[in-house]
C-alpha cells in the first residue's frame, strides 16, 4: 500500500485492527447471547469498522445507520451536532448498540444517545473503535472500547480528513502541518 505524503506514521496496523475486532466481537457475542441486537453505525466514519465487526459476529442482529453532522472539514469539534439521517428501524424495546469510529469530545455521542434513549430501547450501549480520553468534554459512558489513543488526528479505516483517507486499511496519524495552517 502506498504511503500517503500527509501521514506521519501508522498507529494501528491491519493485523492489530483485525485482532481487536475479533476480541470485541467475542465479548459482544457473549453479552448479547440469546438477543437480536440492533447495531447502529454512525456514518460515515464507522462504516469500515461496522462491516468488519458484523462479519465477526456469529449471531442474529439487525444493521442500521444514522448520520449526524460533525466536524465539517475541520479538526476541531464545534460542539454542535445535527441529525442528517435517522435510523430506519423502530428501536423501542430493542437492544441497541451504537457503533462509532472514534470518540473525541463526546458531543456527537451524547447527542445520539439522547435521541435514541427517548425511543425507549430495552438497552442502549456504545461500542467505539478508538477513544481519545484526554479530549473528553462530556460524561458519556463507553461500554466497549477498541483502543485508547493519544490526542493526535488519525485517519484511515473509515476515518477521514476532509473526506480523504477513509479507504486506508490501517489507522495512521496525520502530519500536523497537513491540517494546522
Ligand atoms: P466528538 O463529537 O468530538 O466526540 O467527535 C466525534 C467525531 O469526530 C467522530 O465521529 C469523527 O467523525 C470525528 N473525529 C474526531 N477525532 C477524529 C480524528 O482524529 N480523525 C478523524 N475524525 C475524527
Ligand atoms: Mg469525520
Image: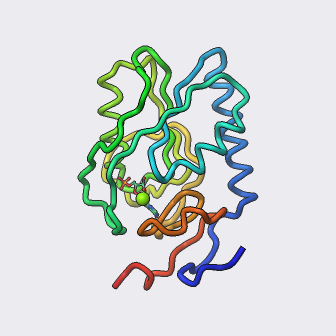
Q: Residue at x 65, y 79 (%)?
A: 3
Quadrant of ligand 2 in image: bottom left
In the rendered image, the vertical position of residue 52 relative to residue 17, given as above or below = above
Query: On the picture, is 28 further left or further right than 65?
Result: right
Percent across and percent down for residue 123 are: 45, 22
Quadrant position of residue 113: top left
Quadrant occupied by the N terminus: bottom right
Q: Residue at x 35, y 40 (%)?
A: 85
In the rendered image, the vertical position of residue 174 relative to residue 66, given as above or below = below
Quadrant position of residue 15: bottom right
Q: Residue at x 69, y 48 (%)?
A: 20
Percent across and percent down for residue 157 are: 59, 59
Quadrant occupied by the C terminus: bottom left
Percent across and percent down for residue 7 are: 56, 78
Q: Residue at x 30, y 33 (%)?
A: 114
Percent across and percent down for residue 107 are: 31, 49
In the rendered image, the vertical position of residue 37 relative to residue 129, given as above or below = above
Quadrant position of residue 105: bottom left
Query: On the picture, is 82 further left or further right than 106?
Result: left
- Colour scheme shown: rainbow
Amino acid at each position: 500500500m502506498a504511503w500517503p505524503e500527509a501521514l506521519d506514521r501508522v498507529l494501528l496496523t491491519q493485523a492489530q485492527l483485525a485482532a481487536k475486532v475479533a476480541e470485541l466481537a467475542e465479548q459482544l457475542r457473549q453479552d448479547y447471547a440469546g438477543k437480536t441486537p440492533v447495531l447502529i453505525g454512525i456514518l460515515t466514519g464507522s462504516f469500515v469498522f461496522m462491516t468488519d465487526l458484523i462479519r465477526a459476529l456469529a449471531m442474529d442482529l439487525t444493521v442500521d445507520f444514522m448520520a449526524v453532522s460533525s466536524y465539517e472539514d475541520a479538526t476541531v469539534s464545534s460542539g454542535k451536532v445535527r441529525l442528517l439521517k435517522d435510523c430506519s428501524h423502530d428501536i423501542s424495546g430493542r437492544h441497541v448498540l451504537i457503533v462509532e469510529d472514534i470518540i473525541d469530545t463526546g458531543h456527537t455521542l451524547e447527542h445520539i444517545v439522547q435521541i435514541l434513549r427517548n425511543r425507549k430501547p430495552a438497552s442502549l450501549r456504545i461500542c467505539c473503535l478508538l477513544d481519545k480520553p484526554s479530549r473528553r468534554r462530556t460524561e458519556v459512558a463507553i461500554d466497549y472500547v477498541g483502543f485508547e489513543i493519544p490526542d493526535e488526528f488519525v485517519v484511515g479505516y473509515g476515518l477521514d480528513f476532509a473526506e480523504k483517507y477513509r479507504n486506508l486499511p490501517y489507522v495512521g496519524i496525520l502530519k500536523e502541518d497537513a491540517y494546522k495552517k
